[in-house]
Image (tube, rainbow, N blue to C red):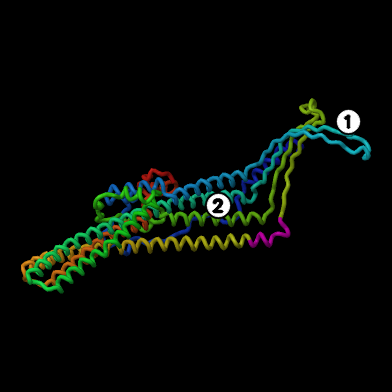
Amino acid sequence: MSFRIQRCLLPIALLLLAACAPVGPDYRPPATVMPGTWAGDRGQTATGLADSAERWWGLFDDPVLTALVERALEANHDLRIATSRITAARARLRLTSAAANPTIDAGAGYSRSRRSENTGGNGGGASSNGSQDLFEAGFDADWEIDLFGGQRRAVESAAATLSATEEDRRDVLVTLEAEVARSYFDLTGNRRLLATARDTMDAQEKTLSVVDGRLRLGLASGLESSQAKTQVSLIAARIPDLEQQIAANINQLALLLDLPPAAMARRLDVSAPSFRLPATLPAGLPSDLLRRRPDIRRAERTLAAATAEVGVATADLFPRFSLAALAGLQSASLSDLVSSGSRYWSIGPSFSLPLFDRGRLYAALDITEAELAEMLASYEKTVLAALVETETALVHYSREQERRDRLAEAVATARQAAVFNEGLYAAGLADLTDVLDSQRTLLAAEDQLIDSERQLAQNVVALYKALGGGWEISGPAAAAAAADGKKPHTETTGISP
C-alpha cells in the first residue's frame, strides 16, 4: 500500500475509532411504581388534570389575585436569578460541546535576532553582522479523539444539568405563584377579621349605650356597665394586632412582586375580596406527578447527569489519542514567504496513558459512583415526598370543607341567638351576661369561619403546588403526553422557561 493511501486511510481509521460506544453506564430512567389512585380523595376531586392546572389561580375568579400573580411572574427576583442560571448552563453546554471539536489556530509573526560572533559561522539568511530576519505564517490543529467517549459523556452531563437547571426555574415558578396566593389569602383573611372585629365593637358599643340608658333609669347596675365597657375594650384591643398583621402581609407581597411597600398598599387598596372557592379540584392520577412536578423532573435530570459523570471518570482510566497537524510558510525574506520553498507541514497521531496516577483516577471514579447512588436515592425520596405532600393536601382540603360547612351553620345559629338576646335585654327580659356571652360566641364562630375559609383557600393552593400546577409541559414530556393521548399543556404565564 502506497504512502499516499496510508495517509488517506489514517484519518478515516481514527474517525471510526472515535465512533466507538462510550465507556460507562448508559442512562435509563428509573422504573418508578406509582399507586393507581389517591388514598385521600373522597370524591371531591376530578379524575384528570384540567388545563386550568396551568393557571389554577383563575379558579378563584379574583382579578386582584390574577394581577398579583402576573406581576410577580414579570418582576420577581428569584425567578430572574433562576433564568440567569439557565443562560449560564446553556453556555456551559456550548463550552463542553466545543471541547470535543478540533482546535484550529492561525498565526503570523516576524522576529529579528542576532547571533554571537564568537559562536562561529552564521546560518543561512544571516547578515554579515550576525543578525537574521524570520517571517512566518501558518495554521496548527489539534484534535483529541474521543475513542472511549469521555467527551461525549461530558456533553451528556452538561445537557442533563441544563435540563435540571430549567426544572429549577419551573420549581421557582410554581413556588412563587403559590407564595403570592398564600400571602394574598392571609391578607384577605386578616382584613375580614378586622372588619368583623369592628362590626362586633359597634354592636357592643350599642349594647353599652343601652346599658348606660338603663343605668340612668335605675334599671341596671354599675357592674353591668363595667362589664359592657370591658367587652368593648377587649374587642378594640384586637384591632391594632390585626392591622399589624395586615401590614406584614402587604410587605410580604411587596417583596414577592418587587414593589415598594407603599406602592403595594396602593395596589391592594380595594374593597372586600371577591374570590370564590372551587367546589372540586382536578387531582389527576399519581403517575401525573412524574411528568408535572418540577422537583421530580429535576431529580431525574440530576440522576442522568450523575450517570454521565461516571462515564467521564471511567474514560480517564483509558489512553488518550490525539491527532496534531501543522502547516505554514517560513522564510528569512518577506519576498520569498509565499514561494513553494517556504512551505512546511507536519501531521501525526499521539497517545498518552496514565501510569502512576491511577490511584487518584480510581478514587475519582469511586466518588462519581457514590454520587450516582446518592442521586438515585434522592430521586426516590423526591417521588415519595411528592406522593406524601399530595395525599396530605387532599386530606386537608376535604376535611377543611367539612369544617367550613359546620362553622357556617354555627355562625348562623349564633347570630340568631345574639339578636334574640339583645332584643330581650332591651325589653328587660334577659340579663346582660346572656347578651355578652352570645356576642362573644358569635365573634368566636365568625373568626373560626373566616379562618376556615382562608385555610380552605390555602389548601387549594397547597394541592395545586403539590400537583406541580402553574407551568408549561414541553419537550419530551409533551411528546410523552401526546403519545398517551393527552393534550400537552401550553405556556400561559407569558414568560418562557
The answer to which of marks 1 and 2 sits earlier in the sequence is 1
Identify the residue at horizontal 72%, vertical 49% (top origin): 351
The answer to whether residue 28 is above or below residue 67 is below
- Mark nearest the camera among 1 and 2 is 1
Compared across the picture, whether 244 is left or right of 216 comes to right
Q: Quadrant of residue 114?
A: top right
Magenta stretch containing residue 361, yes or no? yes
Task: Tell me which segment is drawn in magenta.
Answer: 354-363
Crowding at mark 1 (Cα within 10 Å: few <14, some 14-19, many 20+): few
Compared across the picture, whether 356 is left or right of 308 comes to right
Outermost residue to the top: 335
Identify the residue at horizontal 54%, vertical 54% (top origin): 305
Identify the residue at horizontal 51%, vertical 55% (top origin): 302
Which amino acid, by three-letter code, is at mark 1? Ser
Magenta stretch containing residue 238, yes or no? no
Depth check: give the residue in front, 469 or 369. 469
Which amino acid, by three-letter code, is at mark 2? Ser
Q: Where is residue 430 in the image (x, y as percent from the top left)?
A: 9, 71
Depth check: give the residue in front, 408 or 146. 408
Q: Quadrant of the N terminus?
A: top right
Callout 1: SS: loop
Outermost residue to the front: 216
Q: Position of residue 48 (x, y in %)?
A: 31, 53
Compared across the picture, whether 316 is left or right of 337 comes to left
Q: Where is residue 286 in the image (x, y as percent from the top left)?
A: 36, 58
**Main SS of residues in magenta:** helix
Q: In which quarter of the image is residue 246?
A: bottom left
Residue at the spot of label 1: 127
Crowding at mark 2 (Cα within 10 Å: few <14, some 14-19, many 20+): many
Residue 490 visible in this rendered orientation of the protein: no
Residue at the spot of label 2: 157
